Image (tube, rainbow, N blue to C red):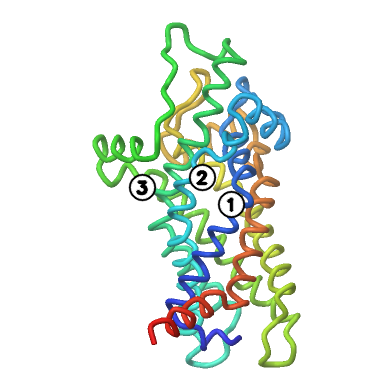
Amino acid sequence: MADKQISLPAKLLNGGIAGLIGVTCVFPIDLAKTRLQNQQNGSRLYTSLSDCLIKTIRSEGYFGMYRGAAVNLTLVTPEKAIKLAANDFFRQHLSKDGKLTLLKEMLAGCGAGTCQVIVTTPMEMLKIQLQDAGRIAAQRKLMPETVAAGSVEPKSPTAMQLTRELFREKGIAGLYKGLGATLLRDVPFSVIYFPLFANLNNLGKRGAEGPAPFYVSFVSGCLAGSTAAVAVNPVDVIKTRLQSLNRGSAEDTYSGVTDCIRKILQNEGPSAFLKGAYCRALVIAPLFGIAQVVYFLGVGEYILSFLTKKEH
């Protein structure tokens, strides 16, 4: 199905449905990624992805792996919808004057990444607090030496409580803490992902105009997603650290992006910037693979046509 034939409502539906399916499948890995990225030298509770998931199930139960999932599921629909629709909009606009060059594809990706942070930043801000709350609680129980004497155990807040608290203390800016780091992550991600996906997908097309088979779209989405995810992982580590409000007493706090980079290099070394990289690849690959399959199967178009028939 050619991009030109897909209406904006269908694109938004496709992006939203894909986001919901993808997040439900990979959320526990995303939780492990956040916890692995946030732990610092001297307070390492988890040694790997599997160790993190096992310890989370033991201390918090199965549903502990889905802490923060409600926020993600609520906001991932507009986030994915904006990202995919914006990329298509910019690609179509930039291709009006002729062939869509690699530079134009990268510019379209840049536009998509810039648009999505409107939703991504507050979503990630809330999700990270909820995901990391279990790590802080487990650290207090299993590593009491990292807890300051006389400190009170923080309560695990809900997403609504967090939102109200951030609004009360800092206004709308509270929800957009880490906006700069989110832009530094999401713009390069989209610049890499969308052109790479489009070119990989074109390799499997049936003829010049025909669409690629769904399995080609899935594999292309997975490969492009995991490549882009690993490439921007250092910025994702910085973003996660900046957006985390609660820390262990022995863990560093950061005043901004440059301060965060300096302290990580000084205290943990360059390898710390790759923390959670394979987790992020495991999260992003199926997330974008599923997104592209839903998009190319035209699920949104089918739902809209069904609703239109019912009205008549």
Q: Secondary structure at mark 2?
A: helix
Nearer to me, 120 or 103: 120
At 71% from the left edge and 29% from the top edge, which residue is drawn? 47
Within 10 Å of disc 3 (Cα), the crowding (few <14, some 14-19, many 20+) is: many
Q: Which residue is tagged 3?
A: 176
Q: Secondary structure at mark 3?
A: loop
Q: Amino acid at mark 1?
A: Thr
Label 1 to label 2: alpha-carbon separation: 8 Å
Label 2 to label 3: alpha-carbon separation: 19 Å
Do labels 1 and 2 touch, CB within 8 Å?
yes
Locate residue 39, reporting x and y percent. 59, 29
Earlier sequence position, callout 3 versus callout 1: 1
Q: Quadrant of residue 3?
A: bottom right
Of circles 3 and 1, the one toward us is: 1
Q: Amino acid at mark 2?
A: Ala
Earlier sequence position, callout 2 versus callout 3: 2
Q: Which residue is tagged 2?
A: 69
Q: Residue furthest top?
A: 149
Q: Which residue is tagged 1?
A: 24
At 31% from the left edge and 38% from the top edge, which residue is drawn? 166
Residue 171, placed above or below residue 268: below
Locate residue 120, reporting x and y percent. 44, 54
Q: Secondary structure at mark 1?
A: helix
Of circles 2 and 3, the one toward us is: 2
At 45% from the left edge and 69% from the top edge, which residue is drawn? 111
